[in-house]
Image (cartoon, rainbow, N blue to C red):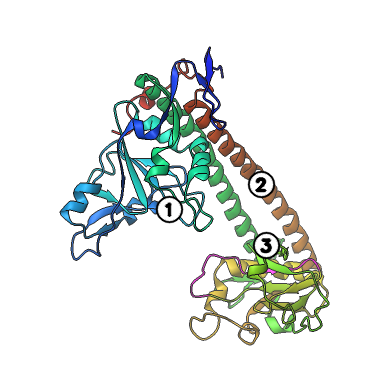
Amino acid sequence: MKPYSKYKQTGITWIGEIPQDWYLSKLKWLITSNDGGVWGNDPMENGTRVLRSTEISVDGKWNNLKDSAYRDLSDAEIRKSKVEIGDLIITKSSGSELHIGKTAVVDKRITSEITCYSNFMQRIRPNTKMNSQFGYWYLNSQISRVQYQIFSNTTTGLANLNSDTISNLYIPISVDTSMQKKIASYLNYKIFLIDNLISKNKQLIQLLEEKKQATINQVVTKGLDPTVKMKDSGIEWIGKVPEHWEIKPLFAIFSNNKTKNINQNEKNVLSLSYGRIIKRNVENNFGLLPSSFQGYQVVASGYIILRLTDLQNDKKSLRVGLSKEHGIITSAYIGLVPKNQLSNSQYYYYLLHSYDIGKVLYGLGNGVRQTLNFSELKWLPLLSPSEEELVKIAQYLDGYVEKIENKKNTLISQNLLLREYRQTLISSAVTGKIDVRDEPIPEEFIKDQIL
């Protein structure tokens, strides 16, 4: 895309050159107000909607509005913090660095009822020199984030913003507000297209994951031969299984790992993360590690690891992993040691993984429990195909899962590149590095997007 014909230096490293007929301003000269929010009291009956950081996505879009907080505010608090169309709402404090500085523009969805904003937010109201949509895109650019990092207050390592930091933000801007609107309309259109691509890729990733899980569940419970005779397993979550397969309790196939790192000879610390056994970075995790690894269990390749803690609260984590190396892992996890050949482990890892995805493990024991131990797990029914079938099923699923993961990784990489391009495009447009004046924009993106 072409640049403007002439540029001038700003003297600001992170902004660089700007078009000749633009000027460098501080944000405080482009706004009529810069105010903190309110929180009030718990509502007695009907409260006033108060926007929080959670209602703004990391990209500055409104979300979760149905879950907005309603608070008891005084008339003075409502007058002070009632938002209007075109206001820009900035997150000035958050537990996540990614969310600090994210900005949303108030539109008719927000003003459909009386709405205020919380004390972790800041509202700025543009004057006639700045188009709200242009300000929205600039404040969500990396150029703004860099300045927040440089000039913000921090007591926790996170960049907490205040009214002064926001007011003194440098912003390159055209005197011509119609030019600002053109840039904003261009970004409304182009970012819409990019976000659609990212969203479609996310949907494809989700579909691939669902297909993978369905295939794993199908193959570990039905086998690879579609013509084989079936029988009722008597197990609610499994249904029918091949007629010649046996059903055994877990303890008939696995024993509980009791080997401890008594003399601390083992140094390879492992961890269960997102359903995978990974090496743990001991050097960078001192605050999260025990003073001694003596109580850790020693594991070998082929051991299956289950994290059956916090069952009441955490219903999302993947709780089953397969160790592929020698090492140690916390004894808070259950280690299953195969009683037969280690080739069995891969099949049973997939079987237990399908149990995990199906939330079977949450229903074990007497009632709902926070933690399960081996004595409660040992009666879990497992399918027992022939040794030959175990190997074939494991090999088939290894190949299938690898193909699916490769496709997912390709889409994930595409999304990373799209997000990088997204940020580059925003920063380039709002600082005048690219000239978008002659770029075609559909009519629906030219009209005022906040009305």
Would you say residue 73 sits in the magenta stretch? no
Q: Does residue 398 appear in the picture of this structure?
A: yes
Relative height, residue 277 to residue 382 (above, below): above
Q: Quadrant of the C terminus?
A: top left
Q: How far apart are marks 2 and 3 (CA)?
A: 23 Å
Q: Are marks 3 and 1 in contact (CB under 8 Å)?
A: no
Q: Distance between the residues labelled 1 and 2?
A: 33 Å
Relative height, residue 446 to residue 308 (above, below): above
Magenta-highlighted residues: 311-325
188 or 149: nearer the eye?
Answer: 149
Residue underneath mark 3 = 219
**Outermost residue to the top:** 5
Residue underneath mark 2 = 409
Would you say residue 317 sits in the magenta stretch? yes
Relative height, residue 48 to residue 300 (above, below): above
Residue at position x 54%, y 55% in the image? 157
Q: Residue 223 location, x and y as percent? A: 70, 64
Q: Does residue 303 appear in the picture of this structure?
A: no
Place residue 252 in its image quadrant.
bottom right
Image disc number at residue 398: none
Labels 1, 2: front one: 1
> What amino acid type is highlighted by mark number 3?
Val
Q: Is residue 441 left or right of residue 401?
A: left
Residue underneath mark 1 = 93
> What amino acid type is highlighted by mark number 1?
Ser
Labels 3, 1: front one: 1
Residue at position x 33%, y 56% in the image? 67
Residue at position x 75%, y 81% in the image? 294
Indicate which disc, 3 or 1, sits on the residue closer to the N terminus.
1
> What amino acid type is highlighted by mark number 2?
Asn
